[in-house]
Image (cartoon, helix red, strand yellow):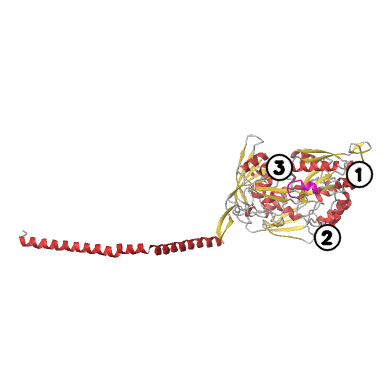
Amino acid sequence: MINRTTRLRFRRRIKRHKLQVEDISQQADEKLEKHFFKRLERLYIVRRFISAWVGLVLLLTGAMVLQTISLGYYYQSIQPVAGGVYTEGVLGTFTNANPLYATTNVDKSLARLVFAGLLTYDQNNNLTAELAQDMTKDDRGTTYTVRLKPNLAWQDGKPLTSADVVFTYQTIQNPDADSPLLPSWRGVQVSAPDPQTVVFVLPAAYSSFPHSLTTGIVPKHLLDGVPLSQLRSVSFNTTGPVGAGSFKWDAIEVKGDSPANREERIGLVPNPTYVLGHPKLSRFIVRAFHDQTNMVDAFKNNELTGMSGLTTMPAELSKDRSLHSFDIPFTGEVLVFFKTTQELLGDVNVRRALVKAIDTNQIISNLGFPVIAAREPLLNKQIGHDANFAQFAYNPNEAKALLDGAGWQMSDAGVRRKDGKVFSLQLHAQNTDEYRLVTQHLKEQWKQVGVSTEVILESESEFQANASDHNYDLLLSGIAIGNDPDVFAYWHSSQIDPVTSSHLNFSEYKSNLADQALEAGRSRDDTNVRAVKYREFLQVWRDDAPALALYQPRFLYITKTKLFGYGPVRINSGADRFNNVHNWMILQRRVSN
């Protein structure tokens, strides 16, 4: 029980604690007033000074941030990087990706992407090794020995050996296989002394033989059991080819319900074991268009990264400055071949007159795109090329005099006649914008000297048929020459006979002197000797005037985006645009230097 004394003591204790709390609270108020509110008043007095310091600190901090960013840009740059999907539209039809049968633009493009050859071409169009490690030849120039690079593999993982190389070329040589490459391989013996070595024995020295080794090699383990007579039509060629090239076949899709809008889409993926390096692109798609309008529309709709197969820039794209276009010279020539066995053209003075009547510079200037002029059957800078033996220069007065001297007199109608016959010739050409323009200029200029010309423009198939049968008076055509100046197939008299494999002497030109020079030029190893022989040929060719040289054709390539790693100086065929496709890049990023 609590007594009165205890209660008083407890009350005094509570009162004392209460006074202590009040005292502490008063002291806290005094200290807050002294140390905070009083100082806030002083801060307000010096507010400008503090603001200046705060601003300076913020300014210095911002400057440091900007400097860091600036230095980052200084030590970094925008560079092309790997990745991206490249979709190319190709004008033409897809029939066969097997390099032994590839003939169309689409076929050759796919064969180049999927398959690899012993040799290929670099950016300067010089021969370089692909599957081959090295190549040697004997003193006679008839035996070539090729060693393969180690550890070569097919895209299905199987080893690639010399047996595959022998299988490829022996298949070409077998008539049952019906390969268009057969003429180039007649008489060549191919053997494999060991898995890494291939030996080629030629029936005679042939200086340009190494250029034949760029054909894609096909896998023996997949095709050896196929009857050669059926090899052209096996599914391997169209639905699942396996090569050793830069890209692997992934899938094919066919679109369109009519021939006009038909389109084949072929998807390719990088080949990680490609001998020249892993491709930079993550995917490559080829879209084969049968109709040019459909391809251009797809390009305008941003469905394509690039286009090939066009001869001229479409008008609707010509003003688009964001596009990138490449005009790459072909190692070939566009010429007018004079069929020398035709009655009117058998007279050398008539042929000379036809050459002198044409201002080739005017034709070139009106093409609308840059080309290199051609003045002789060899290309500039090739072995033996000599401007001193260029074809006869433009001189219409001399052309008229030559025709007068040949008995072709100008009539009142402005057309020449002789013995009651009108001087009239048929000029055949493929029906393209380019050749339509060229033939119009040829017709107009020959008309000025009294020569009547009937221009016949034909579809590709019609033109090829007439060219093959030599069914023409004059033929406007482009020919492939290549890096080597061996033009034997076009000007040697042995190539006139229809039973020959090539039948490419479109002028049906015969000259013993030209034959001898061409034979010697292709069978010599010494560059100086070859040059002498080809100069002899040039002189005879100029004097005989079997054709009119115009210009080197160009390959037009159009892209939507900048294409890094692409920029060939010249190419031998359209498919050669892919010679370094494994280095192509389309993406860019900022990376450290």
Q: Look at the image and tell me in which quarter the C terminus lies.
A: bottom right
Q: Nearer the viewer, residue 580 or 422?
A: 422
> What amino acid type should be assigned to the residue bearing mark 2?
Val
Would you place residue 410 above or below residue 330 in this image? Answer: above
Picture residue at 82% right of the left edge, 61% below the top: 528
> What amino acid type should be assigned to the residue bearing mark 1?
Leu
Q: Which residues are magenta?
A: 361-371
Q: Earlier in the sequence, mark 3 or mark 1?
A: 3
Which quadrant holds residue 75?
Answer: bottom right
Q: Look at the image and tell me in which quarter the N terminus lies.
A: bottom left
Residue 196 falls left or right of residue 396: left
Would you place residue 146 above or below residue 310 in this image? Answer: below
Query: Which residue carries the number 3 mark?
Result: 229
Picture residue at 65% right of the left edge, 58% below the top: 149
Q: Nearer the viewer, mark 2 or mark 1?
A: 1
Q: Residues within 10 Å of mark 1 (few under 14, many from 20)?
A: many
Q: Nearer the viewer, mark 3 or mark 2?
A: 2
Q: Nearer the viewer, residue 198 or 60?
A: 60
Residue 545 falls left or right of residue 194: right
Query: Which residue carries the number 1 mark?
Result: 403
Q: Position of residue 257 (x, y in %)?
A: 63, 34
The residues bearing labels 3 and 2 have C-alpha atoms spaced at a distance of: 43 Å
Q: Nearer the viewer, residue 130 or 587?
A: 587
Q: Residues within 10 Å of mark 3 (few under 14, many from 20)?
A: few
The residues bearing labels 3 and 1 have C-alpha atoms spaced at a distance of: 54 Å
Would you place residue 23 above or below residue 467 in this image? Answer: below
Q: Residues within 10 Å of mark 2 (few under 14, many from 20)?
A: some
CB under 8 Å between discs 2 and 1: no
Query: Which residue carries the number 2 mark?
Result: 529
CB under 8 Å between discs 3 and 2: no
